[in-house]
Image: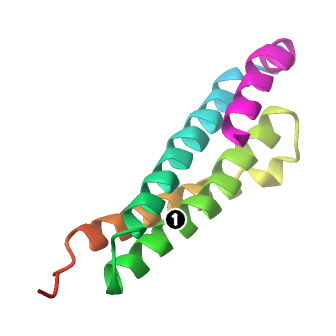
Amino acid sequence: MTGVGIGAFGAHGLAATLAERGMTHAFETGSRYHLFHALAVLAAAAWLRTASGSAATRMLWAARFWTIGVVLFSGSLYWLALGGPRWLGPVTPLGGVALLLGWLFVLLAAFEKRDE
């Protein structure tokens, strides 16, 4: 919901401001990653309904890292695009690392040996 709302606000309500600052691309990148990872968290929730053991724990960590990543990555891009302080610049890659860690945990869960 927040990804759609922020993306729509950027595309319509902030279009002139973002274009004037030359930050439309940065805002759109934040919005795109926000939406992709919202879908990924939803998929993780569906996976968690049937997962058990360490695979479930890993998927839970994936969702946590994606949530942290969206806040840091997309949030810092949104704020920078709107003229936020430049010290936020280094926060963006930290969010990217969190997003990557989420995907790593998905891979670990996917290749988890099942006890049968």
Q: Residue at x 30, y 72 (%)?
A: 109
Magenta stretch contains residue 13? yes
Q: Observer-nearest residue: 50 or 65? A: 50
Q: Residue at x 67, y 38 (%)?
A: 3
Could you tell me residue 80's position as x and y percent?
79, 40
Could you tell me residue 25's position as x and y percent?
64, 24
The reply to whether residue 90 is visible in this rendering is no
Quarter of the image for the C terminus: give it.
bottom left
Q: Observer-nearest residue: 75 or 34? A: 34
Above or below 22: residue 72: below
Could you tell me residue 29's position as x and y percent?
59, 33
Above or below 13: residue 98: below
Residue type, mark 1 in image = Ala
Choose top left, top right, bottom left or bottom right for residue 71: bottom right
The reply to whether residue 36 is visible in this rendering is yes
Colour scheme in the image?
rainbow
Quarter of the image for the N terminus: give it.
top right
Could you tell me residue 16's position as x and y percent?
84, 11
Above or below 97: residue 33: above
Mark 1 lies on residue = 63
Q: Residue at x 64, y 35 (%)?
A: 31
SS class of the residue under badge 1? helix
Q: State the residue lying farthest toward the front.
A: 49
Magenta stretch contains residue 60? no
Which region shows up in magenta? 1-19
